[in-house]
Amino acid sequence: MRLTLSAIFILISCMVYAQHPDWKGGWITNTEDTTATKAPYFRKTFKLKTNVASATAYVAGVGYHIVYVNGKPVTDAVLEQAYTRYDKRLLYKVYDVTALLSKSNTNTQSIAAELGNGWYNIQSHAVWGFQNAPWRKTPRMLLDLVVKYTDGTSETIATDDSWKCATGPSQFNCLYSGEIYDARQEVPGWNTPAFNDSRWANALKTSSPGGKLHEQIMPSIKVIRRIKPVSVKKLGNGRYLFDMGQNFAGVATLNVSGKAGTKVTMYYGEVLKDGELDMKHNTEHMRSMPGELRFQTDVYYLKGGGKETFTPRFVYHGFQYVQVETDKPLVLDIRSLEGLFYSTAFEEAGHFTSSDIMVNKLYAAARQSYRSNFLSIPTDCPQREKNGWTADAHISTEVGLWNYKAADGYRKWLDDVSDAQLPSGSMPGIAPSNGWGYDQPGTEEHTFGPAWGSALSYVTWYMYLYNGDTALVKKHYDAIKKYTDVVAKQAQGYLFKWGLDDWMSLVKTPTTFTSTAYFYTDAILVAKMARVLGNKADEATYNKLADSIRTSFNRTFFDPVSGHYKDSTMTALSAAVFHELASPAAATTAASQLAAKVQRSNYHADFGVMGTKYVLPVLSEHGYADIAFRMLTDTGYAGWGHWIANGATTLFEDWPGELSHNHIFFGDYCAWFYKTLAGIRPDEQAPGFKHFFLQPAFVKKLNFVKADYESRYGLIKSEWRRNGKSIRLSFEVPAGTMATLRLPAGTISENSRRATAYDKAFEIELKAGKHSFDFSAK
């Protein structure tokens, strides 16, 4: 029997989300008091019946869990398991622990776990109100250890009230603030078989968080890089300032020796003030109550007696600097601290480099920002918020898909977005959502509009375009259509008049302009997805809706007499073209206006998060790639190059650099590197790069560009180099695919054959294999 591509994806999807078939365990906790601050320990001992063939642990421990078998951790992952809306969807992890069991069936075995709060039991206060989340309860765990024996029998060691529980050194942990760890309270050997737990209490049977259980298929969070400080400075009075040399998400490991009870406080941050850590920077959303741990702070109490190492287990921060303060004399040096960069452990998918140092630094900064902002969900920033802002996510999705094999991460997050949809069809500005962030017209704080609410549509479409994921289109189609219908009902005369405008722009573009542009594309995407699924009726309906939106938009914003759009901000000019609301003639005029405006502004940006997705592509698509390139790399204020020239290693939230210094939503230029400078472009008529286009832009300031991308069919390569007035093109097309090379007017010679002159742009089909061309522009 032959399966269609769509059927294969549906089958894989069903396999991926198959549940552990027969849970034996029940949910356990140590208390129902959500104000209890100490991280709980759980343990169970058992003996094996005979020789073991395999042993698998199925674990749902929320908010975070660290599991041990015979005293050894079952994984090197951190911050397990992935964050979801726990009362709707729960993920569990599967660990092969066969090698951790003792080979002798006469030996006592142990399985143990420590639980942290994570997002499940936020205990500090912030403007988003996660301390009041509807799912909030104490940490709890469901675990089945399934042991299969060589004689064909099996048994399950499962969580119940026979498990023992206690607390240990972790006195407090909260994602928004930090962790307090008292090493004097450590319990040596607590997770090993020989430990005497007779004085421990029995675990409490408790309720499930409520969500349906699914296996976590997306990669875990891991330490992706260890970072040494570049300097340490003594500030006096037991205070030291460590500079990590780069901004990233994670924690710092402390290596120290001193007297028992010595308190070491580690303050994390991004900005200095008067030579010390700026303690107020980026804290405006915190609502600290008396006695609460400060934002981004870890505290360690020494046990004494020699060298000690402390690594926070249940938190992460966003930082470049760590200010360490001690209440008793300690000697610290540059070896006393090491940074651990945390990120979802996606494999790499693509790489890009060029002859320009600034471009390469911008590329590295975008990747660093992206990695810092995908820790089980795509986030806005790793310090004050850690929220899954929907516009941030969909605007940066292509950055992720070009550089990393992030598809399973987006599949998981699309479930989070779908879970957040209200019965009415409305979507929030963040996902997962605790009930905060839904559109409420007239309430500024909750008015996000289609630019944010369209994440389900956009990310699903990108997943189809880059991975050919038809099953995902089918899975989310009804929800996407429902949301588009809600927007249509709220629109007035096919114009959507509220929502956030071009966030963080220096010059305001009318909200109706940007919101209606996203509304139009929502309708177009529903029509395209309907075509993919063979639903001709819906395709016609939503194409008609799109036509009505486009007509109303141009009637309102376009002046047919002058041939110009009435609003001439960089965002407005580029949005009309990017969203294909402009006619071909109007698009040409708008792009010309945009290029002139950029030049008049000395190549500085006036746009915000929306414009960052539009401006560079619109310029380059209409013949202004050199202007786009200069704008990107210019070091004057305001612009990307200005950040890098002033020492940034990640991207900022705002052009002045007053807010977060690690945001990804200004980073779409990184996708532009692949699509425009290297010219690798997906084809929506043959998704997943079954067929693709090669259309590089030969920017005059560049001498070479080189990129590769691991598509589902194999490695795609694109490279061009200048040699005097000629350009050597080199491409690699994977087996089973074809590419179309598109080049401007000029002269080309293929594989050293006789040169042929072309007066117009031309196309040539490339079959699988390696290809090279020499091209001389006129």
Image (tube, rainbow, N blue to C red):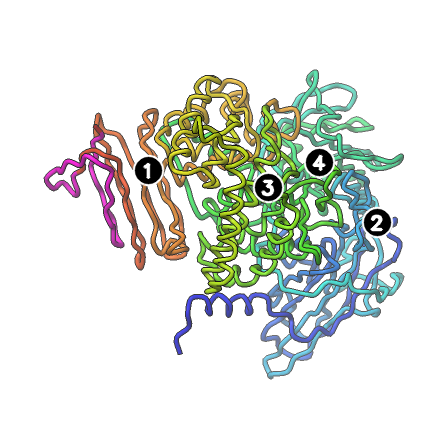
Q: Residue at x 70, y 19 (%)?
A: 273
Q: Secondary structure at mark 1?
A: loop
Left or right: where 696 falls relative to 263: left
Mark 2 to mark 4 CA distance (whole Å):
23 Å
Q: In the depicted view, which residue is nearer to us: 684 or 108?
A: 684
Mark 3 to mark 1 CA distance (whole Å):
37 Å
Mark 1 to mark 4 CA distance (whole Å):
39 Å
Please provide percent x and percent y for residue 227: 58, 35
Residue 38 numbered tag: 2
Q: Which residues are magenta?
A: 749-777
Q: Are marks 3 and 1 in contact (CB under 8 Å)?
A: no
Q: Nearer the viewer, mark 3 or mark 1?
A: 3
| Sequence-earlier tag: 3 or 2 | 2
Residue 654 shown in magenta: no
User: Around disc 3, counting alpha carbons within 10 Å, would you say few (fewer than 14), some (14 to 19), or many (20 or more)?
Assistant: many
| Residue that label 1 marks | 696
Please provide percent x and percent y for residue 289: 87, 36
Residue type, mark 4 in image: Arg
Q: Nearer the viewer, mark 3 or mark 4?
A: 3
Q: Looking at the figure, which quarter contains the N terminus?
A: bottom left
